[in-house]
Amino acid sequence: MDAMKDATTPILLIALGTVWLLDSLDWLPDVRWLWIIGLAGSGIAILLIDRITKSSVVAGPMLILAGMLSYGRQFHALGWRFIIPVMLIAYGVLMLVARSPSIPESRNLRRGIQRREHDGNGHG
């Protein structure tokens, strides 16, 4: 793991240089699309990787919504007067959904608790 930490800066520099070069050559789509796809893609990735947990059920949809609203702002002149209230309402609704007892805290936390229970029963 330490080797990966040491490689972080060079990898980021290579990625930054590559993106800059591709943009200079006009081989990348418009930055606005990268932003929109990045936001929505991050939200989808959170849901796919973490599945449904109390944090992913809020963060994933919020990022997807941010991507959609960013699209609306950039291509359909949606104003902040609309975007901010919609984001606040969505955040509140998702926070209420996350309070459901049927939604787990976290997959990792659940695995840790199960492991401790198993170890406790196996050794006790």
Image: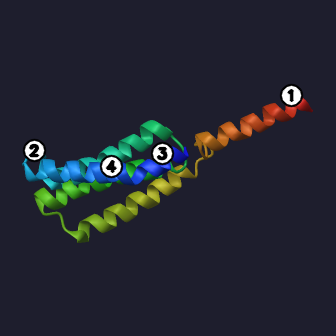
Q: Nearer the viewer, residue 124 or 96?
A: 124
Q: Earlier in the sequence, mark 1 or mark 3?
A: 3
Q: Residue at x 58, y 52 (%)?
A: 99
Image-based side of 103 in relation to 35, left or right: right
Q: Position of residue 66 (x, y in %)?
A: 30, 56
Check the image and report above or below for 40 versus 73: above
Check the image and report above or below for 124 versus 58: above
Give the amino acid at mark 2.
Trp
Q: Is residue 102 visible?
A: no
Quadrant holding the C terminus: top right
Mark 3 secondary-structure assignment: helix
Q: In this figure, which residue is indicated by the disc labeled 4?
A: 64
Rate crowding at label 4 as few (under 14), some (14 to 19) or many (20 or more) other CA atoms within 10 Å.
Answer: many
Determine the CA span between mark 2 and mark 3. Answer: 29 Å
Q: Earlier in the sequence, mark 3 or mark 4?
A: 3
Q: Residue at x 34, y 52 (%)?
A: 12
- Mark number displayed over residue 27: 2
Give the amino acid at mark 4.
Ile
Q: Position of residue 60 (x, y in %)?
A: 41, 48
Give the amino acid at mark 1.
Gly
Determine the CA span between mark 1 and mark 3. Answer: 36 Å
Determine the CA span between mark 3 and mark 4. Answer: 29 Å
Disc 3 + disc 4, Cβ < 8 Å? no
Image-based side of 45 in relation to 5, left or right: left
Q: Earlier in the sequence, mark 2 or mark 4?
A: 2
Determine the CA span between mark 2 and mark 4. Answer: 25 Å
- In this rendering, which labeled residue sits more in front, label 3 or label 4? 3
Q: Residue at x 19, y 68 (%)?
A: 79
- Mark number displayed over residue 122: 1
Q: In this figure, which residue is indicated by the disc labeled 3?
A: 4
Mark 4 secondary-structure assignment: helix
